[in-house]
């Protein structure tokens, strides 16, 4: 069933906002409630908006299952690589060797009451990014598989 032009336009307008807000939740996950899973779910909600506003054949031109499967695999590979980096650094799996070391995500956290900074927490923001990519890909693949069984009927 093809939705009205108002529904399609609204979904097209809100899709980028879902992606941006999901990215915000992922990147601020070590400072505020949220993180990789929640942000990935918000980004997948944008894909769900597109899926309910258009026909399956139309939406699979831009949201491909293979691309989302690749997205899921890249997120998993990033997470495992970050975990193994701790082993190679002489620590345990997921050892947070970046915390306090300077550089990207390695700034030390100031003492006292502070809101924190995006450049802190060491390995945790990288893990949030990996989980966000994984969840975005996984939930979108699930939505695409669920919708692939729906056939459009003529009235």
Image: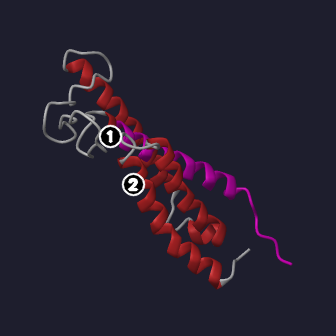
The residue under the point 35% across, 48% down is 27
Q: Position of residue 113 (x, y in %)?
A: 29, 38
Taking the image as shown, residue 136 lies to the left or right of residue 113, namely right
Q: Nearer the viewer, residue 120 or 140?
A: 120
Q: Position of residue 50 (x, y in %)?
A: 58, 67
Disc 2 secondary structure class? helix
> Which numbered marker is on residue 24?
2
The stretch drawn in magenta includes residue 50: no
Using residue 86 as the reference point, say whether residue 147 is left or right of it: right
Q: CA distance from mark 2 to mark 1?
A: 12 Å
The answer to whether residue 154 is left or right of residue 67 is right
> Where on the picture, by quarter, is residue 83?
top left
User: What residue is at 25 percent from the left and 34 percent from the top?
Assistant: 112
Q: Residue at x 21, y 25 (%)?
A: 97
Left or right: where does residue 141 sit relative to residue 23?
right
Residue range highlighted in magenta: 127-155
Q: Count neighbours of disc 2 (C-alpha within 10 A) and say few if under 14, some if 14 to 19, many if 20 or more.
A: some
**Neighbours of disc 1 within 10 Å: few (<14), some (14-19), many (20+):** many
Q: Quadrant of the image for the C terminus?
A: bottom right
**What residue does disc 1 label?**
125
């Amino acid at each position: 069933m093809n939705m009205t032009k108002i529904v399609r336009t609204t979904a097209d307008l809100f899709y980028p906002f879902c992606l941006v807000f999901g990215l915000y939740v992922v990147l601020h996950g070590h400072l505020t409630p949220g993180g990789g899973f929640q942000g990935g779910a918000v980004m997948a909600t944008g894909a769900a908006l597109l899926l309910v506003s258009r026909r399956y054949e139309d939406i699979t031109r831009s949201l491909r299952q293979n691309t989302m499967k690749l997205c899921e695999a890249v997120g998993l590979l990033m997470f495992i690589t970050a975990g193994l980096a701790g082993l190679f650094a002489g620590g345990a799996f997921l050892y947070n060797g970046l915390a306090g070391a300077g550089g990207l995500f390695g700034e030390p956290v100031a003492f006292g009451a502070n809101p924190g900074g995006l450049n802190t927490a060491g390995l945790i923001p990288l893990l949030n990014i990996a989980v966000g990519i994984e969840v975005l890909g996984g939930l979108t693949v699930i939505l695409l598989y669920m919708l692939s069984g729906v056939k459009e009927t003529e009235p």
